[in-house]
Image: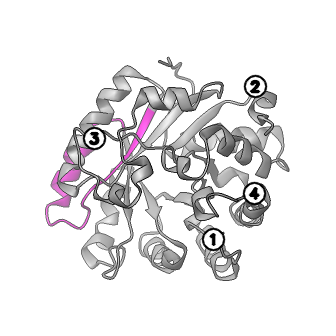
Protein backbone atom coordinates (compact mmCIF):
# COMPACT_ATOMS: atom_id res chain seq x y z
CA UNK A 1 0.00 0.00 0.00
CA UNK A 2 1.21 3.53 -0.78
CA UNK A 3 2.15 5.38 2.38
CA UNK A 4 0.53 8.71 1.64
CA UNK A 5 1.92 10.39 4.70
CA UNK A 6 5.27 10.59 2.92
CA UNK A 7 3.53 12.86 0.42
CA UNK A 8 2.26 15.09 3.22
CA UNK A 9 5.52 15.75 5.01
CA UNK A 10 4.43 19.34 5.65
CA UNK A 11 1.19 18.21 7.34
CA UNK A 12 1.40 18.65 11.11
CA UNK A 13 -0.65 16.20 13.13
CA UNK A 14 -2.60 16.49 16.34
CA UNK A 15 -3.74 13.02 17.30
CA UNK A 16 -6.93 13.85 19.18
CA UNK A 17 -7.75 10.33 20.35
CA UNK A 18 -4.94 8.39 21.99
CA UNK A 19 -5.39 5.67 24.59
CA UNK A 20 -2.53 4.65 26.89
CA UNK A 21 -3.24 1.97 29.46
CA UNK A 22 -1.23 0.10 32.05
CA UNK A 23 -2.61 -3.22 33.26
CA UNK A 24 -0.21 -3.20 36.20
CA UNK A 25 -1.78 -0.02 37.58
CA UNK A 26 -5.45 -0.21 36.58
CA UNK A 27 -8.18 -2.68 35.69
CA UNK A 28 -10.01 -2.57 32.36
CA UNK A 29 -12.84 -5.15 32.38
CA UNK A 30 -13.80 -4.46 28.75
CA UNK A 31 -10.44 -5.76 27.54
CA UNK A 32 -11.60 -9.29 28.39
CA UNK A 33 -13.73 -9.09 25.23
CA UNK A 34 -10.79 -8.06 23.02
CA UNK A 35 -7.84 -10.27 24.01
CA UNK A 36 -5.77 -9.05 21.04
CA UNK A 37 -5.21 -5.74 22.84
CA UNK A 38 -5.35 -6.98 26.43
CA UNK A 39 -1.87 -5.80 27.29
CA UNK A 40 -0.28 -2.55 28.35
CA UNK A 41 0.20 0.16 25.74
CA UNK A 42 2.47 3.07 26.60
CA UNK A 43 4.60 5.75 25.02
CA UNK A 44 7.20 3.33 23.69
CA UNK A 45 4.57 1.38 21.77
CA UNK A 46 2.96 4.59 20.50
CA UNK A 47 6.31 5.91 19.30
CA UNK A 48 6.92 2.69 17.37
CA UNK A 49 3.42 2.69 15.87
CA UNK A 50 3.75 6.29 14.65
CA UNK A 51 7.27 6.07 13.27
CA UNK A 52 7.55 8.36 10.24
CA UNK A 53 4.26 10.14 10.96
CA UNK A 54 4.60 13.79 12.11
CA UNK A 55 2.52 13.69 15.29
CA UNK A 56 3.33 16.91 17.13
CA UNK A 57 0.48 16.92 19.68
CA UNK A 58 -1.60 14.25 21.40
CA UNK A 59 -4.87 14.26 23.32
CA UNK A 60 -5.32 11.40 25.76
CA UNK A 61 -8.79 9.87 26.05
CA UNK A 62 -9.88 7.99 29.17
CA UNK A 63 -9.66 4.22 28.75
CA UNK A 64 -12.60 2.86 30.78
CA UNK A 65 -10.62 1.62 33.73
CA UNK A 66 -12.73 0.91 36.80
CA UNK A 67 -14.61 4.07 37.82
CA UNK A 68 -12.95 4.01 41.23
CA UNK A 69 -9.56 4.22 39.49
CA UNK A 70 -10.13 7.33 37.40
CA UNK A 71 -7.87 9.51 39.55
CA UNK A 72 -5.10 6.92 39.21
CA UNK A 73 -5.49 7.24 35.45
CA UNK A 74 -5.34 11.04 35.60
CA UNK A 75 -2.16 10.87 37.69
CA UNK A 76 -0.66 8.24 35.38
CA UNK A 77 -1.21 10.33 32.25
CA UNK A 78 0.07 13.45 33.98
CA UNK A 79 3.31 11.57 34.64
CA UNK A 80 3.47 10.45 31.01
CA UNK A 81 3.05 14.06 29.87
CA UNK A 82 6.16 14.91 31.85
CA UNK A 83 8.01 12.31 29.76
CA UNK A 84 6.53 13.23 26.37
CA UNK A 85 5.39 16.85 26.16
CA UNK A 86 3.39 16.12 23.01
CA UNK A 87 0.61 15.02 25.39
CA UNK A 88 -1.06 18.41 25.43
CA UNK A 89 -4.42 17.53 26.91
CA UNK A 90 -6.47 14.88 28.65
CA UNK A 91 -10.14 13.94 28.39
CA UNK A 92 -10.76 12.22 31.69
CA UNK A 93 -13.46 10.02 33.17
CA UNK A 94 -15.53 11.81 35.78
CA UNK A 95 -18.65 10.76 37.75
CA UNK A 96 -20.79 13.74 36.81
CA UNK A 97 -23.87 12.00 38.21
CA UNK A 98 -22.41 11.81 41.73
CA UNK A 99 -23.96 13.80 44.57
CA UNK A 100 -20.62 15.48 45.30
CA UNK A 101 -19.76 16.13 41.65
CA UNK A 102 -19.28 19.89 42.08
CA UNK A 103 -16.67 19.47 44.80
CA UNK A 104 -14.86 16.60 43.09
CA UNK A 105 -14.76 18.39 39.75
CA UNK A 106 -13.11 21.37 41.41
CA UNK A 107 -10.28 19.05 42.43
CA UNK A 108 -10.01 17.52 38.93
CA UNK A 109 -9.72 20.85 37.11
CA UNK A 110 -6.79 21.84 39.29
CA UNK A 111 -4.86 19.63 36.88
CA UNK A 112 -4.46 21.92 33.86
CA UNK A 113 -3.87 18.97 31.56
CA UNK A 114 -7.56 18.07 31.91
CA UNK A 115 -9.46 19.72 29.06
CA UNK A 116 -12.71 17.79 29.20
CA UNK A 117 -14.42 14.61 30.28
CA UNK A 118 -15.84 11.64 28.43
CA UNK A 119 -18.52 9.23 29.48
CA UNK A 120 -19.89 6.41 27.38
CA UNK A 121 -23.65 6.12 27.14
CA UNK A 122 -24.93 3.18 29.18
CA UNK A 123 -27.58 0.51 28.65
CA UNK A 124 -30.16 -0.60 29.58
CA UNK A 125 -30.38 2.38 31.98
CA UNK A 126 -29.37 5.56 30.19
CA UNK A 127 -26.59 7.69 31.66
CA UNK A 128 -27.15 10.67 29.38
CA UNK A 129 -30.79 10.73 30.45
CA UNK A 130 -29.98 10.57 34.16
CA UNK A 131 -31.49 13.81 35.56
CA UNK A 132 -28.58 14.56 37.89
CA UNK A 133 -26.01 13.81 35.17
CA UNK A 134 -27.82 16.07 32.69
CA UNK A 135 -28.25 18.84 35.26
CA UNK A 136 -24.55 18.71 36.17
CA UNK A 137 -23.50 19.33 32.57
CA UNK A 138 -23.66 22.99 33.59
CA UNK A 139 -20.58 22.35 35.74
CA UNK A 140 -18.58 21.62 32.61
CA UNK A 141 -19.62 24.94 31.12
CA UNK A 142 -18.71 26.73 34.34
CA UNK A 143 -15.23 25.17 34.34
CA UNK A 144 -14.77 25.59 30.57
CA UNK A 145 -14.51 21.84 30.05
CA UNK A 146 -15.66 19.97 26.96
CA UNK A 147 -17.58 16.71 26.76
CA UNK A 148 -16.71 13.83 24.45
CA UNK A 149 -19.83 11.94 23.43
CA UNK A 150 -19.23 8.18 23.44
CA UNK A 151 -22.17 6.53 21.69
CA UNK A 152 -23.01 3.78 19.24
CA UNK A 153 -25.12 4.71 16.24
CA UNK A 154 -28.36 3.57 17.85
CA UNK A 155 -27.57 5.77 20.87
CA UNK A 156 -27.28 9.00 18.89
CA UNK A 157 -30.77 10.11 19.97
CA UNK A 158 -29.55 10.11 23.59
CA UNK A 159 -26.55 12.23 22.56
CA UNK A 160 -28.83 14.64 20.73
CA UNK A 161 -31.11 14.97 23.76
CA UNK A 162 -28.12 15.67 26.01
CA UNK A 163 -26.85 18.36 23.65
CA UNK A 164 -30.30 19.93 23.58
CA UNK A 165 -30.44 19.87 27.38
CA UNK A 166 -27.09 21.66 27.76
CA UNK A 167 -26.48 23.38 24.40
CA UNK A 168 -23.72 25.74 25.57
CA UNK A 169 -21.22 22.97 26.40
CA UNK A 170 -18.58 22.14 23.78
CA UNK A 171 -19.18 18.60 22.48
CA UNK A 172 -16.96 16.23 20.52
CA UNK A 173 -18.74 13.30 18.89
CA UNK A 174 -16.19 10.50 18.99
CA UNK A 175 -15.86 8.17 15.99
CA UNK A 176 -18.67 9.87 14.03
CA UNK A 177 -21.05 8.17 16.47
CA UNK A 178 -19.84 4.72 15.33
CA UNK A 179 -21.89 4.45 12.12
CA UNK A 180 -23.08 1.01 10.91
CA UNK A 181 -20.38 0.61 8.26
CA UNK A 182 -20.52 -3.18 8.24
CA UNK A 183 -24.11 -3.10 7.03
CA UNK A 184 -23.48 -0.12 4.72
CA UNK A 185 -26.55 1.69 5.94
CA UNK A 186 -26.61 5.29 7.07
CA UNK A 187 -30.03 6.91 6.54
CA UNK A 188 -30.92 7.12 10.24
CA UNK A 189 -27.33 7.87 11.24
CA UNK A 190 -27.16 10.64 8.64
CA UNK A 191 -30.36 12.26 9.90
CA UNK A 192 -29.09 12.30 13.48
CA UNK A 193 -25.67 13.63 12.44
CA UNK A 194 -27.41 16.47 10.63
CA UNK A 195 -29.41 17.31 13.76
CA UNK A 196 -26.32 17.28 15.98
CA UNK A 197 -24.42 19.49 13.54
CA UNK A 198 -27.09 22.18 13.85
CA UNK A 199 -25.50 23.16 17.17
CA UNK A 200 -22.22 24.97 16.33
CA UNK A 201 -20.72 23.77 19.62
CA UNK A 202 -20.72 20.16 18.40
CA UNK A 203 -17.64 18.84 16.60
CA UNK A 204 -17.03 15.34 15.24
CA UNK A 205 -13.96 13.13 15.36
CA UNK A 206 -12.60 11.34 12.31
CA UNK A 207 -11.63 8.22 14.22
CA UNK A 208 -12.80 4.72 15.04
CA UNK A 209 -14.28 4.03 11.60
CA UNK A 210 -12.25 0.96 10.63
CA UNK A 211 -13.31 -0.93 13.75
CA UNK A 212 -16.94 -0.36 12.72
CA UNK A 213 -16.16 -1.87 9.30
CA UNK A 214 -15.19 -5.45 8.45
CA UNK A 215 -11.87 -5.77 10.30
CA UNK A 216 -10.33 -8.09 7.73
CA UNK A 217 -11.75 -6.79 4.45
CA UNK A 218 -12.52 -3.08 4.82
CA UNK A 219 -11.62 -0.72 2.01
CA UNK A 220 -11.50 3.05 1.75
CA UNK A 221 -14.66 2.96 -0.36
CA UNK A 222 -16.54 1.52 2.63
CA UNK A 223 -15.70 4.59 4.73
CA UNK A 224 -15.94 7.39 2.17
CA UNK A 225 -19.76 7.86 2.21
CA UNK A 226 -19.74 8.40 5.97
CA UNK A 227 -16.89 10.91 5.79
CA UNK A 228 -18.63 12.76 2.97
CA UNK A 229 -21.83 13.08 4.99
CA UNK A 230 -19.96 14.22 8.10
CA UNK A 231 -18.10 16.84 6.07
CA UNK A 232 -21.34 17.98 4.48
CA UNK A 233 -22.94 18.68 7.87
CA UNK A 234 -20.02 19.64 10.13
CA UNK A 235 -17.63 21.04 7.55
CA UNK A 236 -13.84 20.94 7.78
CA UNK A 237 -13.83 23.52 10.58
CA UNK A 238 -15.59 21.12 12.97
CA UNK A 239 -13.91 17.83 12.10
CA UNK A 240 -10.90 16.50 14.00
CA UNK A 241 -8.50 13.65 13.24
CA UNK A 242 -7.86 10.98 15.85
CA UNK A 243 -6.21 7.57 15.70
CA UNK A 244 -8.12 5.67 18.40
CA UNK A 245 -4.82 3.88 18.96
CA UNK A 246 -4.37 1.13 20.07
CA UNK A 247 -8.01 0.07 19.55
CA UNK A 248 -7.52 0.82 15.85
CA UNK A 249 -5.01 -2.03 15.66
CA UNK A 250 -7.88 -4.51 15.76
CA UNK A 251 -8.49 -3.58 12.12
CA UNK A 252 -5.50 -1.55 10.92
CA UNK A 253 -2.01 -0.34 11.63
CA UNK A 254 -1.67 3.28 12.70
CA UNK A 255 0.01 4.12 9.40
CA UNK A 256 -2.73 2.56 7.30
CA UNK A 257 -5.44 4.43 9.21
CA UNK A 258 -3.55 7.71 8.89
CA UNK A 259 -3.11 7.14 5.14
CA UNK A 260 -6.79 6.30 4.88
CA UNK A 261 -7.83 9.41 6.79
CA UNK A 262 -5.82 11.56 4.40
CA UNK A 263 -7.34 9.81 1.40
CA UNK A 264 -10.95 10.21 2.52
CA UNK A 265 -10.23 13.93 2.98
CA UNK A 266 -8.51 14.30 -0.39
CA UNK A 267 -11.16 16.77 -1.62
CA UNK A 268 -10.13 19.31 1.01
CA UNK A 269 -7.83 22.26 0.42
CA UNK A 270 -4.42 22.39 2.12
CA UNK A 271 -5.82 24.89 4.62
CA UNK A 272 -8.73 22.63 5.48
CA UNK A 273 -6.45 19.60 5.79
CA UNK A 274 -4.40 21.62 8.27
CA UNK A 275 -7.56 22.33 10.24
CA UNK A 276 -8.77 18.72 10.33
CA UNK A 277 -5.42 17.11 11.06
CA UNK A 278 -3.89 19.71 13.35
CA UNK A 279 -5.55 22.98 14.33
CA UNK A 280 -9.18 22.07 15.03
CA UNK A 281 -8.31 19.75 17.89
CA UNK A 282 -6.12 22.36 19.55
CA UNK A 283 -8.85 24.97 19.18
CA UNK A 284 -11.60 22.69 20.46
CA UNK A 285 -9.65 21.51 23.50
CA UNK A 286 -8.31 25.05 23.96
CA UNK A 287 -4.61 24.29 23.70
CA UNK A 288 -2.01 26.82 22.61
CA UNK A 289 -0.66 25.79 19.20
CA UNK A 290 2.44 27.94 19.48
CA UNK A 291 4.16 26.04 22.28
CA UNK A 292 7.11 23.94 21.03
CA UNK A 293 7.07 20.23 21.87
CA UNK A 294 9.67 17.56 22.40
CA UNK A 295 9.17 13.98 21.30
CA UNK A 296 10.63 10.94 22.98
Asked if the residue under mark 4 is in contact with the one under mark 1, i.e. CB atoms within 8 Å, the reply is no
User: Is residue 110 visible from the viewing direction of this image?
Assistant: no
Task: Answer left or right for 219 relative to 21.
Answer: right
Query: What residue appears at the point 26 percent right and 62 percent down from the top-left corner?
Result: 96
The residue tagged 3 is 74
Question: Which residue occupies the foreground of this view, 38 or 14?
Answer: 38
Dot placed on the residue nearer the N-terminal end, 4 or 2 = 2
Q: How many labels does the image show?
A: 4
Q: What element carries label 3?
A: helix
Q: Magenta residues?
A: 88-113
| Mark positioned earlier in the residue sequence (1 or 4) | 1
**Which residue is disc 1 drawn over?**
198
Q: How crowded is mark 3: few (under 14 residues within 10 Å), some or many (20 or more)?
A: many
Q: Distance between the residues labelled 1 and 4?
A: 30 Å
The numbered dot on residue 190 is: none
Pinpoint residue 287: horizontal percent, then vertical percent.
Answer: 49, 36
Q: Could you classify mark 4 by the number of other residues whose Cα lies within 10 Å: few (under 14), some (14-19), or many (20 or more)?
A: few
> Of the residues tagged 1 and 2, which is closer to the observer?
2
Whole-number angstrom distance, CA of label 1 to CA of label 3: 33 Å
| Secondary structure of the residue carrying numbered label 1 | loop
Q: Which of 115 and 86 is in front in this view?
A: 86
Report if the CB atoms under discs 3 and 2 are less than 8 Å apart: no
Give the CA distance from mark 1 to mark 2.
34 Å
Quarter location, residue 137: bottom left
What residue is at 85 percent from the left and 50 percent from the top?
Answer: 267
Q: Choose mark 1 or mark 4, whichever is in front.
A: 4
Question: Mark 2 — residue?
Answer: 9
Within 10 angstroms of label 2, few (less than 14), some, or many (20 or more) residues? few
Earlier in the chain: of badge 3 and badge 4, it is 3
Amino acid sequence: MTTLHTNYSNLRITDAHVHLWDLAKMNYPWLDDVPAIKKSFGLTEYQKATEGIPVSSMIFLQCECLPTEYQIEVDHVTQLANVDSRIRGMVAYFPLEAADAAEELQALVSNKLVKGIRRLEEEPVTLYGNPRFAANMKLLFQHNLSFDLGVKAHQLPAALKLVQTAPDVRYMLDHFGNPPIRTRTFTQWEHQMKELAENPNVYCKLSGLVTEADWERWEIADLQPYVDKALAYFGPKRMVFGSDWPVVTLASTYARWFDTAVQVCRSLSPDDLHRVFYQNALDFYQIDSDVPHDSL
